[in-house]
Structure formats: C-alpha cells, structure tokens
Image (cartoon, grey):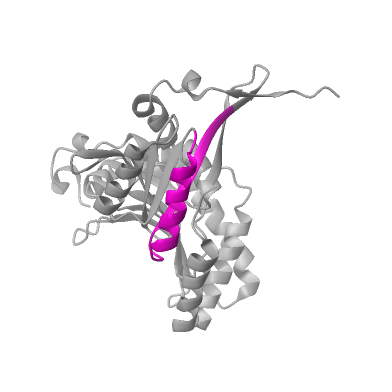
Amino acid sequence: MTLGRLEKIDLRDIWKTEDQDFTPWLAREENISLLADTLGLELEVEAQEKEVGPFRADILCKDIRNDSWVLIENQLERTDHRHLGQLITYAAGLKAVTIVWVAATFTEEHRAALDWLNAVTGDDFRFFALEVELWRIGQSPAAPKFNIISKPNEWSKTVGAATRRIEAEALTDTKQMQLAFWEKLHADLQSNPRIRTQKPRPQHWTNLPIGRSGMRLGAILNTRENSLAVELYLGDENAAAFFRELEQSREDIEAELGFSVVWKPLPEKRACRIIYYKTECPLDDAARWAEYRAWMIESLEAFDRVFRPRVKELDPSRFLGPAEEVGDV
C-alpha cells in the first residue's frame, strides 16, 4: 500500500491578506462550521468588519444554541499585543460572551494571557485561542485545520453553571419530554449533510441555520395543542421586506415545497414567520415520536431545499412599496 505524505503549506500561499482573503473565506457558511465544530459551538455569521467605535472587528457571530454573541479576530502571522488589545476592546464594546482569536502562531505570553482571562472572568465570558494550519497530500487541494491552544475551564464554568441552574430549577415533566424529543431528533440528524440542529435543550423549539444571519429554520413542539411545526423565521430589521419579497413567489414556493404553509407577517413585531403545521399529535405518546421526527425531518429538508437559495438572494432594496401595493399580507 502506497501512502501519501502530508505537506504543510504557508498560509500566505492561499490567503494573501487577512481582510480581503482570509476573513471572507472564514465567514462562508461551510468554513465557519469547521471552526464551530472545533469549538463545539453552533455559529451563524452576523457581520464582517463590525464597527466598534473607531475600530472594526473581523467577524461577529451568534451561537444559535443560546443566542449569544461570538467575536472572531484573525491574524495570519504570529500574535502581537495590538491584536490582544483589540480583542479586549471589541469584547467590551460588543459585550461579546465568547471571544475567539485565530492566528498562525501564538506566543507563550499571549496564550498565557488568554488562560488568565479565562481564569479571572465570570461565567458569562469565554476566550479561545486557535492556530490555523493548511495541509495537502501531493497535489490535493489545501485543507485547513484549526488547533485549540487556549480554552475556558469548561468544568468549572459550564458544568458549574449548569449545576447551579439545575439546583435552582428542576426540570418539569414537560421540559424532560422536550429535551428527550430533541435529543432523539439531534441523533437522527447527525449524518444529515445539510440539516444541523442546535444542542438539545429543554424548551419547546430548536433552531437550525439556513445560511444567512438574521433568519433561521425552526422546529416546534406545542404540548398544549398537541401539534408540531416547522418554520422559516425572519428576525432582523429587514424581516418585513424579506417576507414580502418571498410572498411574491408564494405560489412557486408552495409548489416546490409540495404543501401549503401559513404566512405570518406579524406587523406588531419585528419578526415574520412562514410555518407548516401538523396537528393531532399527542406528544405524551412516545410510541409515535419516530413518526413525528420523520415528519419534521422531511419538512425541514423541504424548507431547506426551497428557502436556502432564496434567502441568500433576498435584497430589501428590491421591495419598494408598502404591503398593500403587493397584495394582502
């Protein structure tokens, strides 16, 4: 058997600059997911070059498991004091709870500085240091690899915080049922190449990325009405314009989905929702959970297939008139 030999590649051979090459590459969905998997997070990019006073942070993300901020600062060379200062400045300005410093090489002093920050800050802040490498075998495309150099003391922070929450509030029977259902759905989707759920939590919904910040897919359990739902949730400041633009293609969208959905503009709120329901689903009947999960997965795959390419092309400037000019919403 003939085996190839790994060859390490200089980062600058692939990414000439940080701001024009590496940051846009990392902000793409398939690449931020690689970094997210390394960290054990579930990230959606919210902004690039986010202004923080007179400075600009490289990438701002949301961890969709808990809707918290994640700040990423990049370097294609050895770490320096300037970037460490920027990280602290950005974290204070954005009130980020997870701060990620990506660099080619970390000095021992900067690694120790992040270790110290993880030790002295409270449970609400976490600092990560990652070294990025590029490798290839023979003439294969270059492959990125992230190595964690510094990370929070998860036992003392995450486990300690979870213990305090459990002590403060025991899970009800309904919360236990919700958690068990989402754990099984999460397991069902582990090998799915497109649908990724957040970490299972004891709540009536779970979120899934759709490839654009400010919007997401959702799966919902309604124990009071014994129903299920999947939805496209539009939640940023352009939600109403995006909703109207999608609604202009309502007939095509529902034809591609293969079923009708409920269009909810929610004018009293900033968010808009497009929902597909399944009724008469007694959730206390665990024997039917496999049936319910199969319906959710099939519906989520349809939503992802139909809406993902559309939401990437949405442009609020294309919708020029008020709602009444394009029909009754």
Residue 287: quarter of image: bottom right
Nearer-the-camera pick, 212 or 249: 212
Q: Residue at x 35, y 39 (%)?
A: 81
Nearer-the-camera pick, 81 or 289: 81
The x, y position of residue 193, in whole percent, is 58, 43
Q: Residue at x 45, y 61 (%)?
A: 119
Q: Is residue 56 left or right of residue 7?
A: left
**Quadrant in the picture for the N terminus:** top right
* Up/down of 234 relative to 123, above or below: above
Q: Residue at x 59, y 22 (%)?
A: 141
Residue 285: quarter of image: bottom right
Nearer-the-camera pick, 113 or 271: 113
The residue furthest front is 109
The x, y position of residue 260, in whole percent, is 41, 52
Q: Residues in magenta?
A: 105-134
The x, y position of residue 252, in whole percent, is 38, 39
The residue furthest top is 139
Q: Residue at x 52, y 62 (%)?
A: 154
The residue furthest right is 1
* Up/down of 166 relative to 1, above or below: below
Nearer-the-camera pick, 79 or 50: 79
Examine the structure image and report whether residue 281 is included in the region drawn in magenta.
no
Q: Is residue 204 at least partly visible in the picture?
A: yes
Q: Is residue 79 left or right of residue 328?
A: right
Q: Is residue 257 at least partly visible in the picture?
A: no
The x, y position of residue 21, in whole percent, is 40, 25
